Amino acid sequence: MTEHPRDITATSPRYDVAVVGAGPAGLAAAVTAAEAGCRVVLVDAGQQPGGQYWRHPDETAPRGDESLGHHDWSTFAGLRTRLHGLVRRQRITYLPRRQVWFVQRPSTGDEPPAHTLHLTTAYAGADGGDDGPDAVTGDAVILCPGGYDRQLPIPGWDLPGVMAAGGVQALLKGHRTVAGRRAIVAGTGPFLLPVATGLAQAGADVVAVCEAGSITGWSRDPLAAAAVPGKGREALEYATALIRHRIPYRQRTAITAIRGTDTVQSVELSRLDREGRIRKQAGTVDVDLVALGWGFTPSLELVTATGAATRKDIDDSLVAVVDEEQRATVPGIYVAGEATGVGGAVLAVAEGELAGLITARDQRAAVSQESVRALQKRITRHRRFAAAMHTAHPVPRHWHDWLHPETTVCRCEEVSYQQVCGARDDLGAGDARTVKLMARPGMGWCQGRVCGFASAKLAAAREGRALTADDLRPTAKQPFAAPISLEQLAEGPQHE
Amino acid sequence: MADTADVVIIGAGALGAACAYFATEQGLRVHIVERGEVAGGTTSACEGNLLVSDKEAGHELDLALYSNQVWRRDLAPHNHLWEFENKGGLIVAATESGAQNLAELARRQRDAGIDVTDVAADEVHAYEPHLTKNLTAAAHYPQDCQVQPMLMAAQLIRIARERGARIWTRTEVTDLHRDGDSVTGVVTSRGTIHADHVINAAGTWAGDIAQLAGVHVPILPRRGFVLITEPLPRTVFHKVYSGDYVASTTSSDEGLQTSTVIEGTRAGTILIGSSRERVGFDATVSLPALRQIAAKALILYPVLAKTKIMRNYHGFRPYCADHLPVIGHDPRAPGMWHAAGHEGAGIGLSVGSAKLLVQQLTGREPDLDLTPFAPERFDLVEAS
């Protein structure tokens, strides 16, 4: 490991490439850049590599079934083997359990423009032992922060027993834990399928998968699907598994209310029209676990901290603007994976590899132009597939019609739908930032990571206009990318 | 939009909102034109202080005391709308010389009409149980208050709208309608509004508006950062700050200055300030400034060492070289009025400033002489 003195004024260890995140994109980026000859540091909040997507049981207590529930485990196993080899040969400095809390921009005239990433331990409660350097500097920085579950408030969503689909999946993959016995999976998009089959395989009774959209949406761009045959095979396998477990798949159906006193007892189902309005009630089902999946929100705080440009993607997520070589609009910053647009692990790996190659090439390593072009082609194909998927599985446009005035929108600050509406109707808040300042959704512990998307949607809908990137930016912009103690903040140098 | 009004107010921050409130109270037809959203500028990036304690005897203190009365009397029926809290201020000193300076400051302030109680070192913890034990003296200011500034601006505008005011957000003033030197309306991105009076309440950007009227109002940005903690059970009860804060608010230094200001909010978070820098409109987060703020806060509240900082924000205080705001009619451009340049005290001073301005605008004698705040005063200084 590199030396890392406490005083970071001039001496935070400097690397050719700093990669943030050890999920699909970050792992691919780090090993690719290192194999091309760069000195690489890989910073990751997780205990072990894999990120959310390749979450698996604790490697220190191996149990032989770590690939259970995974689709492309061999890709991960390969990347992990390369990572371990490169770490042994001191080509990659791997820093698990560390997270970036602040991105310090390059000083004027710094060439190449190096960014310094200030780090803190990623686990609250972990004792303050020297867990790694307090900062690392990268001549190039590849941000692969991934994403998290996109959540939509509905009546009763704050009852225990209601979980984000990704959270249910994480418990299955990481801890082999089933969060309930009688489950329903609802929301939109293909991710509902592995969650439902995973629950069923783990022994839960899955009463239905409710898809708010319709699979006929795919017919709008059949070529996009045909261009990525692997995805078709995957879908077929899941469909077969649903049949095997006798799980009904109900299209244009949503959970529009969840009932229970201390915990979930039942859900109300509704049939939706094309715009997501409730067409008719479709009965009540008793369950003790509700898994809701509305897609994913990319983690954009590190991207915005660099000052790089962002835009609204086709799925209404805020994403980084990158060129065809994964470069963000700020020199020295590259972005790969979900933060450039939600598109799944295969795409993320390709983008990570490309970013690794390009940073190496920018630092004068010999890089095959053919490999670059092949990756770019693969990325284009998967982007088109992702776009078709997002188009077929939008968040229902009239989802807010399902809310009651007292439905909680922000759980941290206990802000109701009525209060969000009041910020606009009574106080004139015309955008998401102003709604947040007036009514406080997104001001609490999670800093809007749970309700930010929904609040932005509500603010725009209330104004009768489409969601804009500016509605999404207040949540994405976090001057501290992670909470830090006052003591830790006070520790460093107090002058430029 | 081609319209007429008695008064057009440029800016929907604290000052614009307060002007709208008092102007509509007098029955005037008001239009508010705002480039962004309600309370979106400096008003959204401050702590909402209504302080008398941080001011030396002089014109600003006179205005602060006047404004304090306006909050308590005129606005009493509405104060619950913006979380008005008469929390009181506590200035603390940690050295013998600091204690002496504080005693002298308190004496001067008492002479100027401030209600202030000297607090001995062994009595401080009756006010603030979690403060460091290493203090030499303190002074308690029962008149100090706090509001939630965005709610205050938005609610004042809501009341003004109920009295007939109209607000145009996302509407930029691109020019002023002129008749010779006189100002007779505003030209906006959505059209022209003719008016007898135009009030420039554009805060840190008020100098640009003044320029459209051909007059010089030198307001500059002075950047400040604030740290926000995770929500905690009530730990800080007053507005607590160190004695050097008063010196730093009145200094004109361009470089980074920090002095500790700590207070709890109704939401449970603690706001920790403050820094002052003259760096233009540079929005880059300055880690050294944040570190200085954190280190100094820990001197007063070592108990907060493990408390997590959730976020920080920054704003640009509208700063005038003599630390006095610009309030009142501009004789160089008849019809043009200013209510801006209150630096770090704009929320507290807003309602007093607005009430006085509207008194002048409606031909009455202002309760407080506005001469020290005259917009043309800088021309005289610069000419001499």
Image (tube, rainbow, N blue to C red):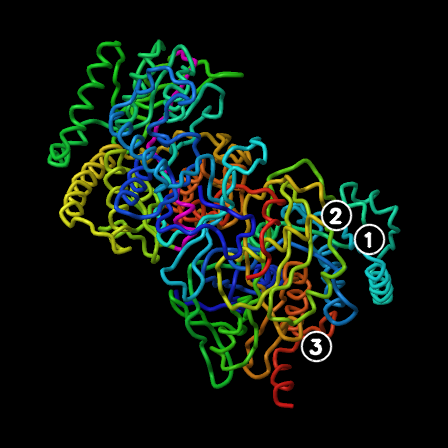
Above or below, A474 relative to A221: below
Marks 2 and 3 share the same chain: yes
> The numbered mark 2 sits on a residue in which chain?
B
Report how far apart the C-alphas of labels 2 and 3 lie in the structure: 31 Å
In the image, taking residue B362 as reference, residue B301 lies left or right, namely: right
Report how far apart the C-alphas of labels 2 and 1 lie in the structure: 9 Å
Residue assigned mark 3: B372
Q: Residue at x 63, y 40 (%)?
A: B307
Kindly indicate whether the residue at mark 3 contacts the one at mark 1 (C-beta within 8 angstroms).
Answer: no
Q: Residue at x 77, y 67 (%)?
A: B56
Which quadrant, please, contains the N terminus of chain A?
Answer: top left
Q: Which residues are magenta?
A: A286-307
In the image, taking residue A133 as reference, residue B322 lies left or right, namely: right
Residue assigned mark 2: B238
Above or below, A72 relative to A35: above
**Disc 2 residue type (three-letter):** His
Residue B176: x percent and y percent? 45, 75
Kindly indicate whether the residue at mark 1 contacts the one at mark 2 (C-beta within 8 angstroms).
Answer: yes
Disc 1: CA contacts within 10 A as few (<14), some (14-19) or many (>=20) = many
Sequence-wise, the earlier of marks 1 and 3 is 1
Residue A55: x percent and y percent? 37, 26
Residue A120: x percent and y percent? 52, 41
Residue A301 magenta-highlighted:
yes
- Quadrant of residue A457 within the rendered picture: top left
> The numbered mark 1 sits on a residue in which chain?
B
Tell me, yes or no, if residue A467 can be seen here: no
